[in-house]
Image (cartoon, grey):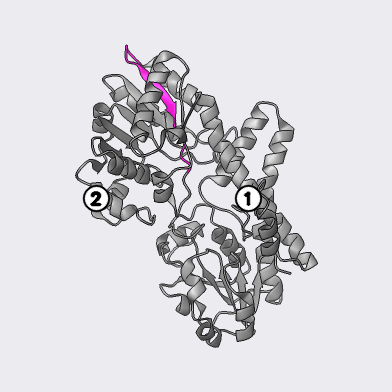
Amino acid sequence: MKICCIGAGYVGGPTMAIIAQKCPHIEVTVVDINKDRIARWNSGDLPVYEPGLDSVVRECSGKNLYFSTDVEKAILESEIIFLSVNTPTKTYGLGAGRAADLKYVERCARKIAEVAKGDKIVVEKSTLPVRTAQSIKKILTANSDGRNFQILSNPEFLAEGTAIQDLEFPDRVLIGGDQNNEGQVAVNTLVDIYKNWVPADKIITTNLWSSELSKLTANAFLAQRISSINSISALCEATGANVNEVAHAIGRDSRIGEKFLKASVGFGGSCFQKDILNLVYLCEHFGLPEVATYWNGVIEMNDYQKNRFTRNVLSELFNTASDKKIALLGFAFKKDTNDTRESAAIYVGKDLLEERAELAIFDPKVQESQIRADLNLDKKDTNVIVYKDPYEAAEGAYAILILTEWDQFKDLDFEKIYRGMRKPAFIYDGRNILDLESLKTIGFKAIGIGQG
């Protein structure tokens, strides 16, 4: 069997690498029109950082895993075609700011209709609005010329930073398809691929619409938990409670559980905000304004948390950051990834730049070009310097902001850092990973999230 994936990003690359590793009898090709991205997949300097990914790619590349820009050849030769292209929030027209922009998905569907010579199974792997499969099917059916196209929904449930582990040992694999005979044959074809390493009882099959909606709902529920504990963190600071203790106490309730109860400067990433905004748009579209308002509140709370963090920083800095060096440790939206999409560091950084601060930024995996692009800077902007060493970033700083929970930040020599900072020396732990009492003993004014 030959399969291909259109889209060599954070989902397509790792997912196909694991399929290739677990199914040596299947030839897997990942295609993308971005020549630089494909070149990096083939060079070993992978465009995606995930712990364990490089070893899987090295094991399979050139054997049954290939990366190519030849989209047409891959479509022609493959029996199954995964669509893993970007589905950003629309920035124009109807639904701007909420609805998903499906132009890349539509282009893929039209390319498949143009190129394919025989029957194909087309699998949605990107996060898509409910009923997108119907749109894809309309395009393919209208141009079928006797060919049979089956559309499946197979949403990913990966957490960046643990994607390889999530792919190897998934909580569940969800596959949605048409409920007719042809649809079920297509579903079973994909089920058989996953059965090479996933236990059968963890593979769930549904209709197309349930599968598409399940992905949006899962991300909405997870983001809701983060916004909920972040809302309580503000109350903890006002009352003298400790949000870590509150989260531990409620997390021991088996009905609630402990996951996604970590207070922070706010959630980021490519999915949470985008998927909730999409859910809000769908609710409004189907005449459910109260439901839309409910889910929009999750986004509003996340924005409030990021803004509140910056306000607290400014308050401690005597309400001015002008001409003050402030060190931002961490720029990725979470540890163990180089993805910066919707990272809280972007919003905090932009707010501080508006206050005319001088930013010193260090992240172990995010490239300087990406940081400057996210902050809308060019090479002439000298109020932001990206360092390759956290100690250099902190030297002479008025404050340090921990914005990504990288493990290495826990082991820094804070006595050395303290000696090199302006006094009073402030540390704002936006991820609650540091021992604040120990830092206070050194001399820092150390502040965490939700710790009154």
Rounded to the nearest angstrom, the CA distance separating label 2 from label 1 is 37 Å
Amino acid at circle 1: Gly
Q: Name the residue at 58% across, 64% down.
A: 431
Amino acid at circle 2: Glu
The residue pinned by badge 2 equals 59
For this view, does 355 lie left or right of residue 114? right
In magenta, the rendered stretch is 144-157
Q: Earlier in the sequence, mark 2 or mark 1?
A: 2
| Quadrant of the rendered image containing residue 246 | bottom right
Q: Name the residue at 35% across, 39% down.
A: 197
Q: Are marks 2 and 1 in contact (CB under 8 Å)?
A: no
Q: Alpha-carbon neighbours of circle 1 within 10 Å: few (<14), some, or many (≥20)? A: some
Q: Secondary structure at mark 2?
A: helix
For this view, does 205 lie left or right of residue 427? left
> Quick check: can you spot residue 160?
yes
Q: Name the residue at 67% across, 76% down.
A: 317
> Quick check: can you spot residue 110?
no
The residue pinned by badge 1 equals 257
Q: Name the residue at 35% across, 29% down.
A: 192
Name the image quarter holding the N terminus.
Answer: top left
For this view, does 408 lie left or right of residue 94? left
Q: Can you give x and y, in whole percent of width and height, for residue 133 in the image?
A: 47, 25
Q: Can you give x and y, in whole percent of width and height, for residue 77 in the image?
A: 24, 28
